[in-house]
């Protein structure tokens, strides 16, 4: 299989400066409106054009403390670049690539000058001390939303402690996004800077188990829940519990544990095997590319609709194709079978599908075609159907939930219980990293008594159900 990365978004300095020079610096900045985090894109692009990398990084950080990670994983072609005025003239500014380079060179310059505390000064620049200085907050979850909320509150004078159930902070940044898309050192540097600024981080602690929710409510002026999603969504397919059928989250987490001696766990057992990935979202694309890079003999992605309805971003789909993954459209697994009753998976029984009237998702509903069953050989099946709501955290805090099992939240991020605010995938059901960053900022500003405008999801298909 091909060893190509999903997409190379790097850009050398000289071409980057030239690209930045194409910017029109629009007075209404439509690109900023396309960025959920509200990064002042024209300002940082102008600094890139003048070669002021450190200044460019500071502008980015003022709005997005995880700017380095977002520069690598954001679907910029669906967000800021989609709104760029130059798109109408043929080619938008490569904002994602410019942000990545500005972040890398700018933060490197800061480290070289031993100005690590410039992170804190930049984040609080121009705001002054908050009227709420001296207050305490607990943040549940050290993913993008939680880290963003903690950073925002700390910059406003709050004493903040973040509780993370995993032993690795970062949420999906550290757990499942493949290292070829997001290197460990990028995430580690951003978390290190947040902690160095004064945010306290406690890992390996599950709120509701080791720490009671009532205790956090009693000891803090605000509690921000950013615990992410719950377990993998089941597919309801016969044989789903058979050995060799695993969730995409488990597979990708094992891949990120690579320590130089090869892929760990399930991801380390892929070489030479036939892999079937079930699902059509970005997680499915990540799993397919990761399996291909681990030298699988064949990687097949089965999806019950067509490429037109697939929720994966075009960039990630192209990356999976480039890696060598095959796509079987209008295909639905109906059973995972082995050579013995309880043996590992050996084949996937599938049925062809046709598309009918739109369902609740707004996409054409897939329907089985009678008499169209066929089988695929498979040594490993990776289920990438999304994740369900985090019911554990919702129950621990006694929050009201909607019909989908997500906590009910008002437009400013307030939950149904006093002092509790919700941000990120826990509330929105699974969106982008930059959306989580934006919602973390929103929740923090609401908790601090400031104005927090409603955040709406960008145009496109977002959500945790990748079927």
Image (cartoon, helix red, strand yellow):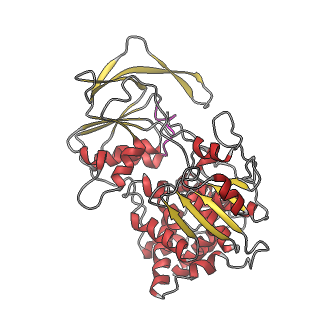
Residue range highlighted in magenta: 306-313
Residue 19: give x, y in percent of width and height: 51, 69
Q: Residue at x 57, y 30 (%)?
A: 363
Relative to residue 198, is residue 342 drawn left or right? left
Q: Quadrant of the N terminus?
A: top left
Residue 128 drawn in magenta: no
Q: Quick one: 135 or 107, which is closer to the camera?
A: 135
Tell me if I can see residue 318 in this picture.
yes
Q: Quick one: 237 or 47, which is closer to the camera?
A: 237
Residue 389: give x, y in percent of width and height: 58, 40
Tell me if I can see residue 40 in this picture.
no
Q: Which residue occupies the extreme left position in the image? A: 272
* Residue 443 position (above or below residue 355): below
Q: Residue at x 57, y 41 (%)?
A: 463
User: Is the stretch drawn in magenta largely helix, strand or loop?
Assistant: loop
Relative to residue 418, is residue 169 drawn left or right? left
Instruction: Give residue 79's quadrant in the image.
Output: bottom right
Residue 309 drawn in magenta: yes
* Residue 277 position (above or below residue 72): above
Q: Quick one: 195 or 70, which is closer to the camera?
A: 195
Residue 302: give x, y in percent of width and height: 39, 32
């Amino acid at each position: 299989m091909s060893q190509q990365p999903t997409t190379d978004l790097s850009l050398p300095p000289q071409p980057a400066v030239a690209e930045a020079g194409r910017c029109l610096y629009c007075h209404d900045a439509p690109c900023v409106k396309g960025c959920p985090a509200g990064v002042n894109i024209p300002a940082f692009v102008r600094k890139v054009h003048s070669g002021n990398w450190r200044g460019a990084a500071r502008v980015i950080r003022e709005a997005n403390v995880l700017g380095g990670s977002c520069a690598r994983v954001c679907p910029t072609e669906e967000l800021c670049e989609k709104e760029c005025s130059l798109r109408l003239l043929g080619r938008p500014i490569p904002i994602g690539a410019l942000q990545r380079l500005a972040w890398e060179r700018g933060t490197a310059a800061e480290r070289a000058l031993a100005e690590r505390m410039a992170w804190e000064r930049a984040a609080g620049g121009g705001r002054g001390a908050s009227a709420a200085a001296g207050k305490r907050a607990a943040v549940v979850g050290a993913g993008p939303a939680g880290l963003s909320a903690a950073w925002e509150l700390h910059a406003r004078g709050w004493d903040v402690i973040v509780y993370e159930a995993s032993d690795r902070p970062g949420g999906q940044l550290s757990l499942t996004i493949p290292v070829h898309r997001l290197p460990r050192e990028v995430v580690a540097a951003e978390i290190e800077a947040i902690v160095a600024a004064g945010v306290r981080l406690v890992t390996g602690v599950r709120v509701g188990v080791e720490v009671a929710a009532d205790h956090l409510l009693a000891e803090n002026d605000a509690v921000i829940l950013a615990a992410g999603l719950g377990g993998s969504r089941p597919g309801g397919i016969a044989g789903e519990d058979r050995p060799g059928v695993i969730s995409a989250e488990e597979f990708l987490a094992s891949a990120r544990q690579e320590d130089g001696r090869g892929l760990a766990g399930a991801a380390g057992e892929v070489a030479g095997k036939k892999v079937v990935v079930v699902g059509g979202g970005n997680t499915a694309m990540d799993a397919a590319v990761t399996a291909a890079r681990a030298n699988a003999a064949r990687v097949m992605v089965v999806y019950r609709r067509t490429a037109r309805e697939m929720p994966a971003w075009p960039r990630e789909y192209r990356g999976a194709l480039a890696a060598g993954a095959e796509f079987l459209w209008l295909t639905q697994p109906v059973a995972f079978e082995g050579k013995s009753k309880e043996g590992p998976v050996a084949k996937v029984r599938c049925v062809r599908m046709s598309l009918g009237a739109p369902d609740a998702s707004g996409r054409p509903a897939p329907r089985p075609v009678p008499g169209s069953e066929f089988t695929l050989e498979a040594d490993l099946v990776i289920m990438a159907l999304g994740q369900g709501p985090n019911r554990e955290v919702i129950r621990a805090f006694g929050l009201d939930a909607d019909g989908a099992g997500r906590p009910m939240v008002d437009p400013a991020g307030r939950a149904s219980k006093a002092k509790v605010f919700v941000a990120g995938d826990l509330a929105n059901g699974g969106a982008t990293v930059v959306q989580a960053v934006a919602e973390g900022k929103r929740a923090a500003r609401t908790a601090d008594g400031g104005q927090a405008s409603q955040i709406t999801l960008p145009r496109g298909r977002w959500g945790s159900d990748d079927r």
